Amino acid sequence: MNYITEYNELKKLTEDNLGRFLFISEDKYIHTLTESMAYSVFAGGKRLRPVLLLASCKMCGGTVEKALPFACAIEYIHTYSLIHDDLPAMDDDDLRRGKPTNHTVFGEACAILAGDGLLNRAYEVMLKAVCDEKNSSDANRLAKAALYISEAAGHGGMVGGQIADLEGENPDLHSLERLEFIHLNKTGALIKAAVIAGALIGGAGDARLSAIEDFGLKLGLAFQICDDILDIVGNEEELGKPIGSDDKNGKLTYPSMIGLDKSQETYRKIHEAAVNALAPFGAEANFLRETAENLYKRVK
Amino acid sequence: MNYITEYNELKKLTEDNLGRFLFISEDKYIHTLTESMAYSVFAGGKRLRPVLLLASCKMCGGTVEKALPFACAIEYIHTYSLIHDDLPAMDDDDLRRGKPTNHTVFGEACAILAGDGLLNRAYEVMLKAVCDEKNSSDANRLAKAALYISEAAGHGGMVGGQIADLEGENPDLHSLERLEFIHLNKTGALIKAAVIAGALIGGAGDARLSAIEDFGLKLGLAFQICDDILDIVGNEEELGKPIGSDDKNGKLTYPSMIGLDKSQETYRKIHEAAVNALAPFGAEANFLRETAENLYKRVK
């Protein structure tokens, strides 16, 4: 199967199940809230994190069925972070992927609660999978996958990256170290967690987990540097957002710190390191390798 | 040991551990965020939910050590809900327990993230306890306790109760059914989850769990009706907030729907049903019984 076909299959599998884990049977008094949660969950997107999680699980010998609750959970976490990031008190964005942001449609209070509800739902779904697993050693692996995702999502990961990013709009606080912290945490942590969680669910041993962790770390960092570069050289239509917005908002980015040429050079090196980390897997890692290559093609 | 001494011991045990599970070793770039999280976690409060969880675990034969991560987790969840409830887009409160609310001290963006971070941390802490538990049947019980808490906290529980409460400020939507939904979910769900989670961790069998669930449901509802009544007949100094604020904000409450006398009568009946639910436990349930009695004393 070629890469695009496989990506789209895993993406469709995720999208077919995002509703199944989200809705609850009795929602008479919370109808607007579930509508608001579903609005953002089904607002499109590449579904990169769940696809990576499912692919990593398959690569390590697991079934996609077992990984699906976790794939959907990580997408709920990603979606909640976008809803809260877009709020007036945060980045104050009216559009996301060309559609009105959650709070512009449902109001701020509902958007805050929709984010809270999605974050919480992610854990409900993962904990249900842990509780339902009959094999105790598999249950332990599922719990470890959920724990890894939780650490990546929390104040030691994504939430921490977000505060460092907001505070980093103050030029006095610009430094390459802070920038790397932001990129590793705000975006990188959840991408890394996706491949690790998939590997844990798939049954990977310590050596494989360690190689995948190395790959995930570098892919996550590469992903965000790519985003920084595309904000300068990208195509507005393809990106679904205006270019130059980072510069306008005084965001701390690789190009703003070290210039465009050096950013592309840094990106190339990190990309190569990500691909090298997959060497122990040989052809089994073709999907993850192509994910990195496809990202790289966009800016080279 | 008398009730007050035991309550204070369990409260102190919780407070001594709230920091241990909250802070992370490396917080150079997220210092303000952790400070903001800690500000609200250590802003006082009765610690009712963790105390109930620990007491319920003890009553069912478990150790407080095993229950502590869950006790702290449920307090983080309670705290996050207060931070988000107080936001300008929600209840817009400047004071909480006589101290400036989180967003008035740290700003809205940081308060949103502090809430997100606390909610997430609750799951990190519980998942860590599940992963570290060597006995697989105990690990399953811990996972079930975490699942129960997650369902109570989510859009099928507390988050759902909050949206129904916000929308219930519209007088056209006032109904006794909605009011009961709000009380059962916004406050009741997490109180019920505290006693159930404690019982699960303590090793309770199905019959005991069912009795405790019944008690928790009624205590949770009683707790909120008590709050409604105290907003009219309470002592401002004791409550730490001005009385009459529900009426001023057009909140849907028992007194606003059925009058003060009938609210007190309803409360008395629910209180009795809560105490009756504990009958199977005999003297073992003295602590939980006294918790209900102490609440009752405040308004009768």
Image (cartoon, coloured by chain):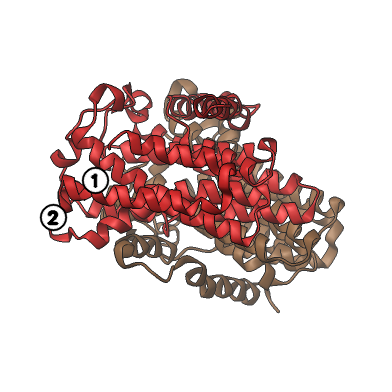
Chain colours: A brown, B red
The residue positioned 50% from the left and 32% from the top of the image is: A164
Q: Can residue B209 be seen in this view?
A: yes
Q: In this view, does A193 lie to the left or right of B161?
A: right
Q: Which amino acid does label 1 sit on?
A: Gln
Q: Which mark is residue B171?
A: 2
**Secondary structure under the numbered disc 1 in the rendered image:** helix
**Among the two numbered marks 2 and 1 on one chain, the one whose residue lies closer to the N terminus:** 2
The image shows residue A255, relative to residue B26, as above or below, that is below
In which quadrant of the rendered view does residue A284 lie?
A: bottom right
Quadrant containing the N terminus of chain A in the rendered view: bottom right
Q: Distance between the residues labelled 2 and 1?
A: 23 Å
Q: Position of residue A146 (x, y in %)?
A: 65, 53
Neighbor class of circle 2 (other Cα within 10 Å; few <14, some 14-19, many 20+) is few
The image shows residue B47, relative to residue A273, as above or below, that is above
The image shows residue B256, relative to residue A75, as above or below, that is above
The residue positioned 59% from the left and 46% from the top of the image is: B198
The one of B1 and B134 positioned closer to us in this rendering: B1
Total numbered labels placed on residues in the image: 2
In which quadrant of the rendered view does residue B84 lie?
A: top left
Residue under pointer 1: B264
**Secondary structure under the numbered disc 2 in the rendered image:** helix
